[in-house]
């Protein structure tokens, strides 16, 4: 039940008295900035934003939402395409001020607060020549990407981000703070590794670190033809596990590092990270460079954190769909190119991430991420500015996904938008769904944490 206006104001006033951090409501000058999320097309007006200073603040805010009936939204980096990091009329718990990072280089582990970004964490650990595999964007909040799974630059070498999660400090729906690990609250620990924010607010994460400093990586751009796409995926599949690749099939933007003659034409813009012995780099990269004459080759010796450098365009609105597959055949590759050229979105791409390696060696039932045996992750995306074009671009995305055989194939919640219950259900195949519902029933029986790709409590 939503509280009345007076009761709501009283509850927010009480929270302001209790928190060490700031509580920002519509009457405060910083309200419009505080309510913003990454996708500018999401424009919601929460009753208040609680900018938590630490775990105790989060626990107080969760308790107030439960007791008052205010809808609760939790924001780490604010990258949810569905807008789950904000609310109309509810309470937003904003973790962005919680960015502490405590690195123990000797034990190869770090505790990081969930409001830190992937770029901040990677730069801090990189000073010690250490790294944890995260995603491919510096501005993503580490809380969100970790709980979703984390498919990034080190996925074939070290697996998903959750495969390096050692423990988490979690605020549960009753306002209690628990430590989840293999030894403590093991069912909760299993569920948060892929089950997202359904079970509580992860305020601090302990992550394993790997000795990774100097690598060979960067952008390789090839002209996109069906043959090039298929050969690129074959090369990435056959590559040593020291190499992970993310291929973006897209219409070349007019960027300085893209040759003018390629502007507006289909290209494969790939991010490659080779983290193996230096003497093996040339041989590992040769098959990619032999596919076609590169339009640009910026793959070179760099420090690992440099993969996160560079500006990204500010996002307005985005349509997207993703699924897991085992291959892309020439007909599917041709469909990608044809439909990219037909889209009117200001930016559109089909992203192909080759899996296998370390991710596949973890048993499917070891975590809530249950797609360990799949070879390929496919993400179709279209960015646009005019909200009136929403149906056009969502229709394009859905049509391309269907033509690639992705309907009903299961997906990755970290890239989901506002999906149907059936799509969320398909993300957790086999017995995973039933186990998640049981954990949800135990830790959040009233579904307080429902602004997410929701897993309803078990009966």
Image (cartoon, rainbow, N blue to C red):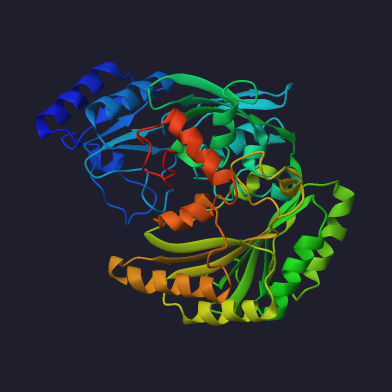
State the residue in front, 411 or 91: 411
Across the whole image, how many numbered discs are drawn on residues? 0
Whether residue 228 is visible here, answered yes or no, is yes
Q: Residue drawn at (24%, 40%), measured in percent from left and top?
A: 46
Q: Which of the 4 image quadrants contains residue 409?
A: bottom right
Where is residue 371? Give x, y as percent: 64, 52
Residue drawn at (89%, 50%) of the image: 279
Between residue 265 and residue 44, name the one nearer to us: 44
Q: Is residue 99 visible?
A: no
Instruction: Answer above or below: position of 277 versus 60.
Output: below
What x and y, as percent, mark residue 60?
A: 33, 21
Question: 57 left or right of 398?
Answer: left
Q: Is residue 67 above or below residue 253?
A: above
The N terminus - image quarter: top left
Residue lying at the far right of the rendered structure: 279
Quarter placement of the C terminus: top left
**Is residue 420 or residue 434 the one in the foreground?**
434
- Whether residue 311 sits left or right of residue 301 in the image: it is left
**Which residue corresponds to the image point at 54% horizontal and 30% vertical from the top-left?**
188
* Residue 298 horizontal/vertical position (percent): 69, 60
Instruction: Relative to 205, say whether 425 is above or below.
Output: below
């Amino acid at each position: 039940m939503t509280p009345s206006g007076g009761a709501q104001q009283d509850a927010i006033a009480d929270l302001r008295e209790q928190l060490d951090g700031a509580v920002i409501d519509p009457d405060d000058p910083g309200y419009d900035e505080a309510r913003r999320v990454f996708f500018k097309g999401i424009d919601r007006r929460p009753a208040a934003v609680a900018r938590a200073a630490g775990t105790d603040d989060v626990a107080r805010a969760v308790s107030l939402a439960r007791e008052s009936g205010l809808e609760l939204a939790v924001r780490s980096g604010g990258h949810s395409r569905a807008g789950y990091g904000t609310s109309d009329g509810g309470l937003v718990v904003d973790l962005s001020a919680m960015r502490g990072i405590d690195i123990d280089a000797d034990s190869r582990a770090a505790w990081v607060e969930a409001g830190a970004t992937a770029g901040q964490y990677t730069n801090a650990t990189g000073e010690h020549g250490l790294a944890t595999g995260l995603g491919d964007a510096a501005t993503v909040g580490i809380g969100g990407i970790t709980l979703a799974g984390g498919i990034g630059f080190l996925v074939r070498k070290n697996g998903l981000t959750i495969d390096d999660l050692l423990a988490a400090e979690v605020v549960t729906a009753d306002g209690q703070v628990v430590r989840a690990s293999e030894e403590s609250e093991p069912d909760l620990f299993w569920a948060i590794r892929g089950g997202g924010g359904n079970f509580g607010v992860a305020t601090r994460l302990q992550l394993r670190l790997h000795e990774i400093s100097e690598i060979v990586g960067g952008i390789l751009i090839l002209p996109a033809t069906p043959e090039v796409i298929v050969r690129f995926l074959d090369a990435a599949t056959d590559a040593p596990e020291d190499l992970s690749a993310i291929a973006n099939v897209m219409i070349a933007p007019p960027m300085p590092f893209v040759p003018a003659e390629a502007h507006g034409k289909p290209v494969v813009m790939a991010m490659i990270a080779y983290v193996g012995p230096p003497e093996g780099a040339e041989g590992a990269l040769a098959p990619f460079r032999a596919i076609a004459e590169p339009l640009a080759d910026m793959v070179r010796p760099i420090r690992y954190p440099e993969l996160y450098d560079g500006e990204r365009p500010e996002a307005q609105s985005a349509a997207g769909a993703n699924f897991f597959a085992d291959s892309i055949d020439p007909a599917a590759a041709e469909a990608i190119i044809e439909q990219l050229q037909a889209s009117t979105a200001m930016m559109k791409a089909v992203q192909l991430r080759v899996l296998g390696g370390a991710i596949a060696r973890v048993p499917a039932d070891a975590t809530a991420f249950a797609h360990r045996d799949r070879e390929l992750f496919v993400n179709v995306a279209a960015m646009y500015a005019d909200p009136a074009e929403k149906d056009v671009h969502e229709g394009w995305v859905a049509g391309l996904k269907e033509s690639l055989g992705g309907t009903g194939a299961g997906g990755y919640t970290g890239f989901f938008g506002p999906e149907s219950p059936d799509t969320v259900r398909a993300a957790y195949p086999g017995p995973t769904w039933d186990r998640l519902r049981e954990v949800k029933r135990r830790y959040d029986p009233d579904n307080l944490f429902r602004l997410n790709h929701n897993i309803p409590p078990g009966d």
